Image (cartoon, helix red, strand yellow):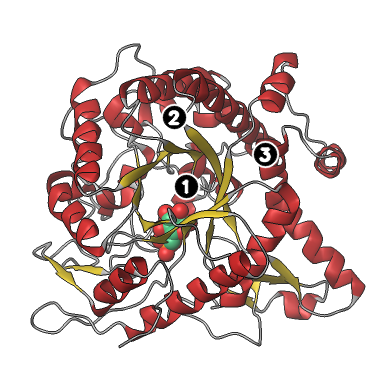
Amino acid sequence: MGLRKDFLWGGATAANQCEGGYNEGGRGLANVDVVPNGPDRLAVISGQRKMIDFDDEHFYPAKVGIDMYHRFKEDIALFGEMGFKTYRLSIAWSRIFPNGDEDTPNEEGLKFYEELFKECHKYGIEPLVTITHFDCPMHLITEYGGWRNRKMIDFYENLTRTLFTRYKGLVKYWLTFNEINVLLHAPFMGAGIYFEDDENQEQVKYQALHHELVASALATKIGHEIDPENKIGCMLAAGAYYPYDCDPRDVWESRKKDRESYFLTDVQSRGEYPNYFLKEIERKGIKLEIKPEDFELLKKHTVDYISFSYYSSRVTTVNKEILNENTDGNLFASVKNPHLKASEWGWQIDPLGLRITMNDIYDRYQKPLFIVENGLGAIDVPDENGYVEDDYRIQYLSDHIQTMKDAVEIDGVELWGYTTWGCIDLVSAGTGEMSKRYGFIYVDLDDKGEGTLRRTKKKSFDWYKEVIASNGANLRNK
Ligand code: BG6
């Protein structure tokens, strides 16, 4: 059994990292707009430093992104040229509801995405829409406190009902929340939450997650009611934890680490909180406010498929000395794996870890999977024509695609598709840099926002085109 004939090859982006046009088309201000690049970024995205508007000291890369708001036709044409079967993108909530709590949506925002989806279909590209990719209208944060407030479920319901109704027939594949587990690591970015001085941060985060889980189940219900053809999935920042050592205590530690994320997919896929999670929060003294009707909603409206991002595996240990030898990663600190090399940003490279992660998830849920992010963030040096010889990216992607195929062909994992992250260069979520590039398409823009924004093809552009044309059979770098 090879990859399905209708395997959905493509690429992924997020509104806040590429659209720009932050104050155009009636769009309202959002959390993602006021996140600066530079040394203060981490404190802001993690909710430790309050930033609710722009200031003169910082640079805010999301204001312009890569200007896709004005250039989406040119960009989608390039995706079409590569033969994309799908394009994963996200909706900027504040384009549809500028404040978030209005009853009536902003027609200009709705029109924008309608045109974009139609443009995709022109090239036979199926849109895959993330309803929320780290963004939240600022008004919902200043007025209601973001996802810590249960009222957010109503506002999200309104958003999703509007989207499912308006885009019926145009969009079939949906994801409710991008990397839902990121809320625990970057609560301002994940859920519009910043903390007051003396509050119990864990309590706030888990309550916010409960609200998102209920909102996600409600969206799944509504999406299926409006169009039974809709396929609605969850999305996790995945990457299996390995024990540093075969000391059983390390093995146990790694299982516990995996559960810190899997409890969310357990709810979204199986419909209930697992016992290990309920015991854990009880020990921590966290009391979740759960309404009786939440249980039924979560149980009845589970997801159709499980999507995830994979950049690297992770490592943990009980050995305190080793535990401090951290490496960078997708917002998760992890122990450095001595067997692996790393990217220029310290993210360790582990293609086999993708196969391991796919098997872990499939064994656990037996639902179709969708890899919606994978890729290498690297410094690219273009020649005078804007051409980049990105053999390192081709190597990274082909190694991962090979193990992905092994998971399908040898292990029998059911997989719907694969979208590489940042198929066109865009602003990094973690660092706010432009210089951390993932794309097949180079964008002339630097970390200070200087550049022509011109798009040029990298070497990987033609390579990926061939991968898609051969349905993954030809991974060779010529
Ligand atoms: C995922 C996010 O965490 O990883 C993306 O869903 C993000 O938004 C991607 O861009 C890569 O991370 P970074 O920090 O290199 O942009």
Dot in front, 1 or 2: 2
Q: Which residue is mark 1?
A: 49
Q: Nearer the viewer, residue 42 or 376?
A: 376
Can I make out residue 226 in this image?
Answer: yes
Q: Which residue is mark 3?
A: 269
In the rendered view, does 240 fall on the left or right side of 114? Answer: right
Tell me how far mark 1 sits from mark 2, CA to CA: 14 Å
What residue sits 64% from the left and 32% below the top? 302
In the rendered view, does 29 fall on the left or right side of 153? Answer: left
**x, y percent for residue 160:** 43, 24
Three-letter residue code for mark 2:
Ile
Q: Earlier in the sequence, mark 1 or mark 2?
A: 1
- Residue 106 lies in quadrant: top left
Identify whether 48 is placed above or below 110. below
Three-letter residue code for mark 1:
Arg
Q: Earlier in the sequence, mark 3 or mark 2?
A: 2
Q: Which residue is mark 2?
A: 141
Tell me how far mark 1 sits from mark 3, CA to CA: 34 Å
What residue sits 57% from the left and 36% below the top? 196
Q: Nearer the viewer, residue 191 or 413?
A: 413
